[in-house]
Image (tube, helix red, strand yellow):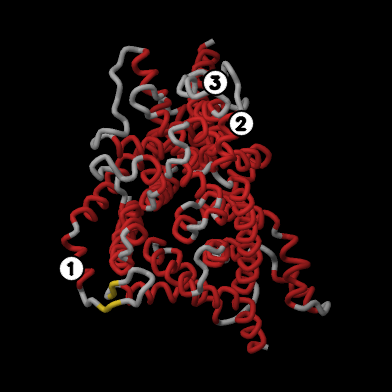
Amino acid sequence: MKKALLLTIKYAIVFVFASVFLYPFLWMISGTFKSDFEVMGLSLIPSHPTLANYLLVFERVPIMRALLNSTIVSVTITLSVVTFGAIVGYSLSKIKWSGAKYLTGFIIFTMLIPFQLTLIPTYLVIVKLGLTDNLLGLVIPNALTAVSIIMFRQFFQSIPDSLLEAARIDGCSELEIIFKIVFPLSRPAFITVGILTFLTSWNDVLWPLIVIRERSLMTLPQLVTVFVLGGEAETHLGAELAASTILALPIIILYGFFQKYFIQSFVTSGIKA
Amino acid sequence: MRNRATIQGLGLSLPYLIFASGFVLFPLVFSVYLIFQRWDGMSAAVYVGLKNISRLFQDDLFYQSVLNTIIFLLINVPLQIIFALFFAVLLNSIRFLSGLFRAIYFAPVVVSGVVVTIIWQQLYGYDNGVLNSLLSGIGIARVPWLTSPTIAMPSIAIMATWKNVGLYTALFMVGLQDVPIDLHEAAIIDGANAWKRFYRITIPLLTPTMVLVVILSTINGFSLFVEPYVMTGGGPMNSTMSTLLYIYNQAFYFGHFGYAAALGLFYAAIIFIVVIIQRRVLKEE
């Protein structure tokens, strides 16, 4: 009896906090269908549902173009980080060369450098390369990360050397071993690094604000920020919420399907970093 | 044989070596060069000697921004730990739908900070924001969440806690799984009550996770940018001007790239020292 009561109280608390985390999102989504008069209300059900907020966003800013830009940038960065991170991670864990130790040490050292230090100089590198107002300026400085290399390295260390030795005796080249044996065995590492990289680049807003000025090249979070701050929303709160919903929805949908992998990725990288 | 391995190793590391020389090593060296220059990013840089450094030591707004960031950390980090620990123990003690609830608590972590800020800006509205409507509904005075210089930064810290606590909850839940059950059973036989068991067994065994959470949330806090940028623009009265926002403004609003680089270097040194001290102190405990 006492146990049942305790369990009921526990679930009540869990539910209260679940609504604390969910309500703001639901309020945002329902607000996109509300009129200007109603939008600040607490209710989650619009009394006169309207699409005017979305129409205003589409009319004022090239948001679909920004969605495309963000997709191109995030997918390219993710593919690059995963491919090169894995290849370098392999050379640091599975090839016995004397430089591996030093290079690993150096990479770990660079992870301790706060990005605030290299932010301005990196921008000036991009200026010198002529890559401002260019999607490449968003991709190239993020095309490889120290964390990804270290995570792949750690994962590959658990693959037994004897397996690779056997393949070498069978006449496989090193690249064949990498792509045909090591990579297929390492799906969890690819999923972890892939999810984290994609999410980081999708949600990044500081770097796009620095590199891109041209409207048609802006990423989605950047365009939404500019839309909200730049006065185009003209205090149409519903339109701000609509833009912000368009930004959030792709990730929320992905998260809905793959939430276990998302949480797992964050936890492993947190513990290993 | 050994030579061959060296060639292979170097060859496969080549992507990193190329990348690092352009985007790790060069910016590091370049940042030192920039400190001595005045540069608007377009015309030629002018050598100004130690001017940027001496200016840095007189820049009250910079120190205020560091102080603001520290205030943010002092509120945010303890809140994260208390709530994350509470949620982890709570979710760990239920079976049914525990995974679903963990996923709900975690959801704000994956969503863009821009989205979270836009939502909370409205929740924090003074006249008809959701929070003040709720408060006045139960007879409590409205709070000037974003308009009072003393309350604005705590408001941002509360929002940041809401956004990230799910991550730290998930980390603590992993840590809790490592706490052996027989230890608890033995303690129950010895007559220890739930609170005592939590305090004497769970907390000490969670120390490594606690260290991790402190360091991760500190590093996170030092990169505070988009929340004040969107929500308050650094105001009111510069009370939410985070250091990163200040550096960003110096470079991209005023075009003082040399000075911004000097600030970046100085700020990075502060971050580095704080994190090293944290590691030392926490490891000893």
Number of callouts in the render? Answer: 3
User: What is the spatial separation of the Cα atoms under label 3 and label 2, in whole angstroms?
Assistant: 22 Å
Kindly identify the amino acid type of the residue bearing the numbered disc 2: Leu
User: What is the spatial separation of the Cα atoms under label 1 and label 2, in whole angstroms?
Assistant: 55 Å
- Which residue bears the numbered disc 3? A44
The image shows residue A11 at horizontal and vertical percentages of 53, 20
Q: Is residue A16 above or below residue A119?
A: above
Q: Going by the image, does B77 lie left or right of B5?
A: left
- Which residue bears the numbered disc 2? B100
Kindly identify the amino acid type of the residue bearing the numbered disc 1: Ser
Residue B176 makes an appearance in the image: no
Neighbor class of circle 3 (other Cα within 10 Å; few <14, some 14-19, many 20+) is: some
Assign a secondary structure to mark 2.
helix
Chain under label 3? A
- Which residue bears the numbered disc 1? B54
Residue at 66 percent across and 65 percent down: it is A83
Assign a secondary structure to mark 3.
loop
Q: Going by the image, does B159 lie left or right of A72?
A: left
Residue at 34 percent across and 77 percent down: it is B44
Q: Earlier in the sequence, mark 1 or mark 2?
A: 1
The image shows residue A273 at horizontal and vertical percentages of 49, 57
